[in-house]
Image (tube, helix red, strand yellow):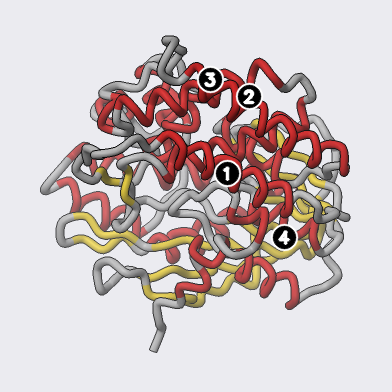
Amino acid sequence: MVKQRAELTFKNNLKHGRHGWVRLTPAYSVSLVSELIAQNNAYVNVLDPFSGTGTTGLTCAQYGINATLLDINPFLIWLAQVKTANYTTVDRNLAKKISNVVVDTSRLLSKSAKTWTPPIHNIHRWWSPDRLSVLASIYQQIMISCERKSTRNLLLIAFCRLLIDWSNAAFNHQSMSFRDELTSMFDESEMMFSAFTEEVEMVTRAAAEHISGNVDVILCDSRELAVDNECMFDCVITSPPYANRMSYIRELRPYMYWLGYLVETRDAGELDWQAIGGTWGIATSRLKDWESSNTFESSYLQNVVSSIARSSETLANYVHKYADDMYSHFLRIKKRLTAGAELHYIVGNSKFYDTLVPVEKMYAEMMRAAGFTDIDIYPIRKRNSKKELFEYIVFARNS
């Protein structure tokens, strides 16, 4: 029987130093990447074309293996770069020193001056006015007080942790939801200032670890793989977006707005449209007019699309476009792999209406059509949602 195995999810990362700096619910586990590396300790250059929070790259680098990480989201590129960087004693000590200055100055400003807040729609659903005022003061002082980029990055990680911990966001479902807003009967500012100082302490402690492997983090569309370096890869360890209409942008919005990676509401929809599997905002409306331009043929895909179309043409197009995009990726990535390179794709199946979408079998078909060999599928865990939903590793080898 395949169990849920929470240790293979993002929950396991929360207790592993840098891996737990900023959470993303769909992120997969450092333990899973470690298991895959242990199966073949001869990997030299590992590629993760859907790098997310950088779990693959950081794990590889901790084992002294070089890694290249690709993602289409600029905030995730920043996050992976920060997580995989090395920090000096000066960086860490300065971060703690400046955090005290930030707190002392913010005490004076949080209630006496109006500071910038990000243009998040219905922002008070995220934070009460008092909490928002404290966050805005801390953010402003970080940007004013710290010119050293590496140190500022550590402070911003601590800030990202603070803004989620003190938000009304809840993560007890597959994706993010909101708690009912609570009105505090007392001043929470000192608690928030103390929490920020504790976050800086935690972040700087994890930042003391030396990262021995080299990690390149590149903003890139995995369907194009337009990467300047000429490195060839002997392994791929990755977890692409699932075909389940869960938008990563939705969960990342607070970080992206505060740090300036999103400016207008439309920006989130545009980025989600560019991403594989994205459905936020305008991405959904554009699916209505989308038409396939790929040559990949699959009995699984044809049957699934026809079945879903009886209930929703838009969702049928969504699944079809997801398959087209992934096939384009498999065709492109083959050119960057050495002979015998191993591929490990962690992916979950999906269900729309009464139609099960066997994504793992569709991946196997795509890999075979793209010229990969030794393809195998094995389940790794039961997901804690519908009873038919599992996560799999789809393995292949480059011929």
- Tell me which numbered mark, 4 or 3, is placed earlier along the sequence: 4
Of the 4 image quadrants, the one containing the N terminus is: bottom left
Q: Are marks 2 and 1 in contact (CB under 8 Å)?
A: no
Q: Is residue 106 left or right of residue 5?
A: right
What whole-number distance in Å separates the C-alpha atoms at marks 4 and 1?
24 Å
Q: Which mark is residue 260?
A: 3
What whole-number distance in Å separates the C-alpha atoms at marks 4 and 3?
28 Å
- Tell me which numbered mark, 3 or 1, is placed earlier along the sequence: 3
Q: Which mark is residue 142?
A: 2
Of the 4 image quadrants, the one containing the C terminus is: bottom right
Depth check: 93 or 168 in front? Answer: 93
Q: Is residue 92 left or right of residue 56?
A: right
- Tell me which numbered mark, 2 or 3, is placed earlier along the sequence: 2
Give the label, 2 or 1, closer to the camera. Answer: 2
Residue depicted at x 82% and y 37%: 91
Other residues around mark 4 within 10 Å, as few (<14) / some (14–19) / many (≥20): many
Give the label, 3 or 1, closer to the camera. Answer: 3
- Tell me which numbered mark, 4 or 2, is placed earlier along the sequence: 4
Other residues around mark 1 within 10 Å, as few (<14) / some (14–19) / many (≥20): some
Image: 81 above or below 370: above
Give the label, 4 or 3, closer to the camera. Answer: 3
What whole-number distance in Å separates the C-alpha atoms at marks 4 and 2?
29 Å
Q: Are marks 3 and 1 in contact (CB under 8 Å)?
A: no
- Tell me which numbered mark, 2 or 1, is placed earlier along the sequence: 2
Extreme residue in the top direction:
114
Q: Which residue is mark 1?
A: 329
Name the kind of residue labelled 3 in the image: Gly
Look at the numbered disc 1 and give the secondary structure of its residue.
helix
